Amino acid sequence: MADALISVLVEKLGSMALERIEEEVRLVLDVKKEIEEFTGNLEAIQAVLEDAEQRQVKDASVRNWLDKLKEVSYKMVDVVDEWNSESLKQQVEKQEREGPEGGKALAIQKQKKKKVWFSIPSHCFCLGQVSRVIIRRDIALKIKDLNVRLSLIDQQRQTYKFQYLERGVEQPERQKTSSFVDISKTFGRENEKNSLISKLLGESQEERGLLVFPIVGMGGMGKTTLAQLVYNDENVKSHFEKRSWVCVSDPFDEVKIAKAIIGKDAPNSTELDYCLQCMSESIKGKRFFLVLDDIWTPDHRKWEQLELPLMQNCANGSRIVVTTRKQEVATMVGTSTHIIHVEELSEQYCLSLFNHHAYFGRGKDESNVFGDIGMKIVKKCKGLPLAAKTLGSLLRNKKTRKEWQDVLDSKIWDIDEVEQQVFQPLLLSYYDLASEIRSCLLYCATFPKDYRFDKHNLIELWMSQDYLNLRRNKEMKKVGHTVFDNLVLRSFFQDLEDDVIDKTTMHCKMHDIVHDFVQFLTKNECFMMEAKDDNDEIESVPANNIVEQVNDKLRHFTLMFAPYGPFPSSVSFDHCKNLRSLATFESKITVIDSNLVSQLKCLRTLNLSHNDLKEVPKEIGELIHLRYLDLTENRSLEELPNTLGNLCNLQTLRLLSCHKLRKLPETMGKLVSLKHLYIWDCSLLMHLPKGIGRLTSMQTLDECPLYGSDSEEACTFGDLGSLNQLQGRLKIKVLGDWMDDSEAEKAHLGKKKQLFHVELDFANLESKRRKSNVEIVDVLQLPQHLESLTIAWYEGVCTWPTSLMSLNSLRILSLFRWTVCEIFPPLGKLNSLEELEVYDTKVKKVGVEFLGIESQTSSSSCILFPKLKKLKLEQMPEWEEWEGVEEGWKEDSNISIMPCLSSLQIDSCDQLKTLPDFLRKTSLLQNLTISGCRTLAENCQEGSGKEWPKISHVPNIEIEAQSWFEKAYAMYYGGHDDGDNVDNKDEDQ
């Protein structure tokens, strides 16, 4: 963690422009000289930090030296940020003095290379600027003091004789493996073993060549054990003419691997080409089976150099099994269909493994005497075989119930055996990470176990702590995505959930043992306190434990289970005023004391989400270092103080589902560093303050209420025009009267090239003197690259926005409450459309215009809805007819309609009687659901319904006379009846 911190600090110091320093500051010290000396010492220390980081795990004196180094570094980061904050405040004041035009100067300044300017304008000694000189003199004195302290730390460095280590070259020793396995000591891998053996012995035509099967999983999950079981299986032994087991580890040594495959006749030569020639000759014409255990190197050149000679001479049916912790290695050596992910053991098998080691050698009378405690200990293992084996072996020689209970009650990292045996494999993966990625991983220790991480939120938290180093001028959030993906690829995250729209991983969790591991590595900097409401008294961890851990070294504090009421008085921050993050989880705090806020001046991150705050103290404006503020789901919060505008470093403000929030501070325009503003589901927040348009760094604005005509207080479409860095999702709520098309043009939506989802909500557009929805949508000029679009409360009787048909990248389209619309747009022309949902329209007939055919005499060769996979049509009570194309015209044509359709859902369309004929040819249609359509349900009865021939080929059909709403209503009021189920074709499947 120190390495990443110092990397950030060196970068900050290197970007300081020192050529203009006011004379008053020169009188205190030569700032330039001090900064250069400080940076030089830091760089000398940084060169040996890899060695220090590894040694500190076992050497307390090195750990103490690193703590001192981090303390000085943290303080210097704060000092640099103080100077930067003063510069930002000057820019904001200048912007306000110059009016709206001042925003242009600020935008130009932010486009330049970011620098902390040691400069004071020549006129600063008037108009109250003297105080700023005093502030900067104080900062300069702090720099001088910190430089003295760092010099002493650098001198101490000499005594430890640290070595320069290139990352990933010299790491803690990796355990060597062999092919031998004691089957009696393995539990629960029978299914995986049989599945893999079946693949290895397969003889189909596509399986005849050399195939590679990667086994992927976190350290200690049992990858090697699975490979050993397969390697020693009798069917495998008899099937392959030659078998070889190679423990690869790191570095990937092609000569060593080649010699291991050759065996006892391996040459003495170390020449790569000769060894590869001998290896290729040794397997010539033979069907061989090779296990390459524990590969770390994702270098495809090394892999290809080894694979090629193996492929050229082997017999058909040869197989390779590779075990690795890295998804990128698995992808490099094998195809995605052959990758095997080793999952946690079930609790039953984990208990069997634990009992085998805990009771081994004991008589029957002694076995399972502490079974209830043993079961609770096994639950802490969370299916990790290595943890169950280690804890079972630890308890083998413990004879009393108290000894077992002590192990159960201990923090898992306090058990030496766990640290040495379970955490050692994780340390290998940890040291394989770059320094900034390590810091991001360790920050996860501030969250409770089993927490469901949101990718974007996690990246914003890393940003707030300065963990994302901006090398090579990459945008910070892109660096964050790379870091997150690295942690996923190295199995530090699991239970991955993909985003519906962009298909990238959006949510994940962390295995409990990995969480214990990161808490172990951060136990001096992170502290989690549980407060429980028991007879109106706060119970917390023992007081002596708090005194031990809550001190000036503490940087991150997490409070759990605080009961309804004020912030617990038992929590004191008198001894930890250097906190950089404060978070609450599973709490219901109603009041935050202003003194508490004033104490924590170094905070970068403040997470008070899911509490019940009624107000935020005005002292929040004193937290000048604050980058991240989360007040999500404080449902009683009505407004925020104007002092919020003092937070010139604030990057992220989260206010989701603050249902009583009526307005944002008028000072919002002063938040010049704000990148992410979340106000989704703030139902009473009907406008944004005018100053939002000046925040040109804004990247995320999930919901944006905008007025269509000029307003002195509220944001209009014109104010959106300067926010060209917006990305991701944007919901626009169109408000008030619509007076002028030019106002919509000013939004410049087409220039916002990083938006991939837009929602237009016309529900609050006033009817008086209103422009047509059609005109508004067209004038807005939607971005041509949009992938997802939602339009709600649209009112266009016989027309639709022509601009809609130019969105050639659109994959997902949702049309909600088109309450006046009588005709569908020609959506069949959208060549990229994959998902379409239509909800609550007045349409009576869906005809060929929906498919994109202008008339039955149009060209007879075309594909309509070429990529559509999911179609959902709901709440269309007046819909009577759905036609395709005329039968005679269809016979002479080469037309294809919805060839990729896999799911069709029709709900609450009670007047609909028939389905279109083209459904007969939708060969990929797998799921059809019809509900709340009584006439259509009758006509689609299996065998007897006249519409049945159109859908008889669909494997999964569910038809119910009741709509989902009617069923939910009936269940809620106790009137649920399953008798309305007309047909369920897949019931027997």
Image: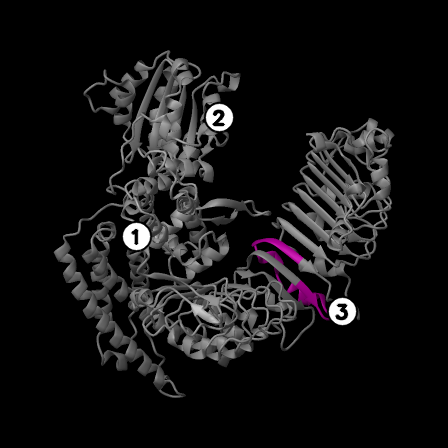
Residue at the image point whose x is 56% and y is 44% from the top: 503
Q: On the rendered structure, is 89 left or right of 972? A: left
Outermost residue on the left side: it is 159
The answer for how far apart the CA atoms under marks 1 and 3 are is: 65 Å
Looking at the picture, does residue 388 appear above or below residue 584?
Answer: above
Of tags 3 and 2, which is closer to the observer? 2
The residue carrying mark 1 is: 414
The answer for how far apart the CA atoms under marks 1 and 2 are is: 39 Å
| Secondary element type, mark 3 | loop
Of tags 1 and 3, which is closer to the observer? 1
| Secondary element type, mark 1 | helix
- Residue 622 rendering spot, x and y as whole percentages: 42, 77
| Few, some or many residues within 10 Å of mark 1 (<14, 14–19, 20+) | few
Quadrant for the N terminus, please.
bottom left
Query: What's the colour scheme?
Result: one colour
Looking at the picture, does residue 117 appear above or below residue 892?
Answer: below
The answer for how far apart the CA atoms under marks 3 and 2 are is: 63 Å
| Residue 744 falls inside the magenta stretch | yes
Q: Which of 607 and 698 is in front in this view?
A: 607
User: Which amino acid type corresponds to the residue marked 1 in the rendered image?
Assistant: Asp
> Which mark, residue 195?
2
Magenta stretch bounds: 733-759
- Residue 897 rendering spot, x and y as whole percentages: 75, 35
User: Which amino acid type corresponds to the residue marked 2 in the rendered image?
Assistant: Ser
The residue carrying mark 3 is: 766
Outermost residue on the front side: it is 365
Looking at the picture, does residue 312 appear above or below residue 376?
Answer: above
- Residue 306 rendering spot, x and y as whole percentages: 33, 25
